[in-house]
Every structure is written in C-alpha cells, then in structure tokens.
Image (tube, rainbow, N blue to C red):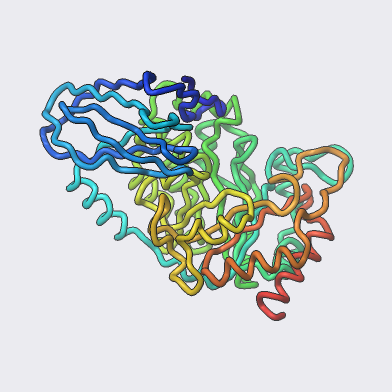
C-alpha cells in the first residue's frame, strides 16, 4: 500500500491495497461524546468491493461505487477521549483507491450547510452565457516564434482590446483568465503579494483592463488562482511546510485584496488543487470563501476537486476538470435535460454543473517556436457536445491555448465561431 505522489504541496490517495488483511489504523482524540457520521472518500474501482470500519466496538460496512464518491458508514456514538479506527477492504476485490475518512457531528453538518447557503450567489449569470473560455496565459506562455518576454513586459504589451474582440467573436459568455499559475505572478498590483516576494506583481493593471473591455461586450471575467507550489522561491515564503494556519491566513489576505480591488468587475474565482493542497489540512473554508467574495457578494466560487467529490459546502460551481465526454456532459446522470443545472445527487450534489476541458492538446502554449496544434474536435462534435450541455444547464468552459501576445489559433477561432452560430444564432 502506498500514497500516490502527485507533487509538492499535495497529498495523494492510497493505492496498492492487496487483500482483506491490509488495513489502515488511526488513533484519534474525540473532543466530546456524541453521535458522529463517518464518511469515506474513495474510488471503488468495480463491483463487489466494500470497506469495513471497526470503531467503538462496532463493525460498520459500506459497498463501494465504481467511481470516486463520498460514502457514509452511518452514525456511531463515540466516547470523549482516545478512539481507534481500523479500516479494511473485505470484499471479493479490494478497494482501488482510498483518500480520506471524515467524522462529522450531525448538528455541525447542519450548521455548516446553513452558513454556506447564506454565502451562496446565484449561478444564473453564468448559465445565461451558455459557455465560456479559459486561457492559461502565464509566466510560462510562449510566442509563436522567438524568445518569450519577461512576464511584466508581456503584461505591459498585452492588447486587451484585441483580446476582448477575439473573445466576443467566439460568443463566450465568460472568460477564466489564469493568474499565479507556473510562476507565482499576478497581472496587476497586489501589495500583499509584494510583501511576500517582491517582483511578482505588475505596474499595469491588466486585470482591470480586461474587466473593462470584456465588460463592454457583456462578457464576465473570472480569475484562476493557484496554491503556488510550482514556484520554489514563492513556496518557501508561504509557511505551508511549517505552519498551515499561517499559509491559509496569507492566502486569505491575498485573495481578499484581489476581491476588494476589483469588486463587481470580477464575477468568479476558480481555485485549483483544492482537493489535494487544501482539503487534507482542514482549511478554514468559510473564511476562504468570504475572502473570495470580498468586494462582491455575488461573486461565484469554484474549488477544484478534479474527479473526486466536492471539498466542502462553501462554494457554488463544480470545477469539472475532465474530458468532454458524454458522462461528464450528463453529470453521470445527475444533470438531466431540462433540469435546474444543479447536480441532483452523487458526489457533487447541489453544485452548479460546469465542465473545464481543453480544446487542443494542452492547457496552455508552453513550447517555444511551435504553432498551436489543431483542435481535437470537429465542428459537428463540438456543437453537439455544447448543445447537449446547454440543454442540461451544464456550463462548458473551454480552455484554448494562447500565444504570449494574446492571440489564439485561427483554426480554434473558426471552430468557436461555428459554435457561436449554432448555439446563439449570430
């Protein structure tokens, strides 16, 4: 049995379970006697697989789902003080992947849900736009030919008007623009980031310029934000490896400063790696979401759980990072045609349906002296997929590779124009 290594700053799942003799054991300190619901985040991997939990003199058992899911063993009364839990997989075949156990008092669960719903914003503006675009425009982005500019120079030279005109041609209702991916840079001023590591912000406020130009065209602007673990110099200054509380306090200050600066001009935040970098350390989700909504209570929030269950109650929109398959469009059966657009059940229950997928071969254009490759979908395929998603109020965000000067591939632009004509009739 081993933990999957998925990179610095992340906790992976356990895999390599051999048979019923393998087990995991925890000794925990229960703060107060009472009923606790015990849940498992796990991927069964096939039929006739189960988990058994020995706790407080009881054997609790749950049958596993083939895909990632959050499954409940039910409630058990735990005494205050030290308690041991032992987990086995006694089915015909062992569990494929196991990520976590969650222990939650029912009254605490109800309180979390109540507080979360008070922070919820309407997803209707997102749904009304039908579909959107994502651009991984980062410190690692490359031009079509020649050497790349330094990030601050590329920000200074970025043509926001040309970019907004291009997005308008595609018919996209929103844009997710990447900040802080690859190197931890921000395309505008941010005093909090300057205090962490000088030289990572910009004099030109490209975020404000993009928000203004896209806003003129009635296109919503979202910002993508990364934990920062891909940037060694930045990561050293985040306290993540020394003190998780300080890490999240710093995160809250940075995100709150962004939210306050741009107010209503920013419609959403797309937070990456939430399931692997944030969730394992019991982060202050409510405070994080309040920071994300600073300056605009109507701002939507996405915490990326990839293909695993949702990370908490304090957000509205499923990240949906996956391929553009029929199962993803249908929400594995939980996003019916003509429905509300919210998952009716399953591991993402209650979240707004949303898909994040790339249209070419990569999330961004990171190779020197090479053109962006062709789209992986034909016009007919792309139109059919987007139409199906729209009929379910499931919102696709289509990531397109982008050159450092802000241009995209002519072939991709042509395909997206065809989608606009088919979906929006103009």
Of residues 9 and 216, the one drawn nearer to the viewer in this rendering: 9
Locate residue 172, reporting x and y percent. Answer: 65, 67
**Does 149 sit left or right of 282 as displayed?**
right
Q: Is residue 176 left or right of residue 163?
A: left
Question: In the rendered picture of this protein, how many numbered marks are placed on residues?
Answer: 0
Give the camera-side residue of 305 and 197. Answer: 305
Quadrant for residue 153, please give it.
top right
Q: Quadrant of the C terminus?
A: bottom right
Q: Residue at x 71, y 75 (%)?
A: 422
The answer to whether one can see residue 16 in this image is yes
Query: Does any portion of residue 213 appear in the rendered image?
Result: no
Spot occupied by residue 369 in the image (x, y as percentages of width and height)? 88, 40
**Residue sitting nearer the eye, 184 or 422:** 422
Q: In this view, which residue lies farthest toward the front?
A: 92
* Viewer-closest of 426 and 261: 426
Q: Position of residue 215 (x, y in %)?
A: 60, 68
Q: Residue furthest bottom?
A: 425
Specify the quadrant of the image occupied by residue 380. bottom right
Asked where in the image residue 218 lies, by quadrant, the reply is: bottom right
């Amino acid at each position: 049995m081993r933990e999957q290594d998925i990179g610095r700053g992340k906790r992976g799942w356990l895999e390599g379970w051999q048979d019923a003799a393998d087990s995991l054991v925890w000794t925990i300190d229960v703060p107060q006697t009472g009923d606790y619901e015990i849940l498992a985040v796990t991927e069964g991997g096939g039929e006739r697989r189960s988990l058994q939990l020995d706790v407080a003199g009881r054997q609790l058992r749950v049958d596993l789902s083939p895909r990632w899911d959050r499954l409940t063993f039910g409630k058990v009364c735990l005494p205050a003080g030290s308690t041991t839990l032992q987990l086995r997989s006694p089915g015909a075949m062992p569990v494929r992947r196991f990520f976590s156990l969650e222990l939650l008092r029912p009254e605490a669960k109800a309180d979390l849900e109540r507080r979360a719903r008070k922070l919820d914003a309407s997803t209707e503006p997102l749904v009304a736009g039908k579909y959107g675009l994502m651009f991984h425009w980062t410190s690692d982005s490359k031009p079509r030919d020649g050497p790349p500019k330094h990030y601050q120079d590329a920000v200074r030279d970025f043509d926001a008007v040309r970019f907004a005109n291009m997005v308008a041609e595609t018919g996209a209702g929103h844009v997710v623009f990447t900040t802080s991916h690859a190197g931890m840079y921000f395309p505008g001023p941010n005093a909090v980031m300057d205090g962490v590591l000088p030289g990572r912000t910009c004099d030109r406020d490209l975020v404000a310029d993009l928000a203004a130009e896209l806003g003129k065209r009635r296109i919503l602007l979202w910002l993508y934000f990364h934990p920062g673990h891909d940037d060694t110099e930045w990561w050293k200054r985040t306290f993540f490896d020394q003190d998780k509380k300080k890490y999240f306090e710093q995160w809250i200050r940075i995100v709150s400063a962004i939210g306050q600066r741009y107010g209503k001009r920013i419609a959403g935040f797309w937070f990456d790696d939430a399931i692997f970098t944030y969730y394992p350390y019991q982060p202050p989700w409510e405070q994080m979401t309040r920071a994300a909504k600073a300056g605009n209570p109507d701002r939507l929030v996405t915490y990326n759980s990839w293909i695993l269950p949702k990370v908490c109650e304090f957000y509205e929109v499923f990240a949906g990072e996956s391929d553009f398959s029929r199962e993803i469009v249908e929400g594995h059966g939980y996003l019916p045609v003509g429905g509300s657009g919210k998952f009716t059940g399953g591991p993402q229950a209650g979240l707004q349906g949303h898909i994040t997928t790339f249209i070419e071969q990569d999330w961004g254009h990171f190779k020197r002296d090479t053109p962006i490759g062709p789209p992986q979908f034909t016009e007919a395929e792309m139109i059919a997929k987007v139409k199906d998603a729209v009929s379910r109020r499931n919102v696709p965000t289509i990531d397109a590779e982008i050159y450092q000067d802000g241009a995209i591939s002519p072939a991709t632009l042509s395909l997206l124009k065809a989608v606009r004509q088919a979906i929006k009739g103009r």
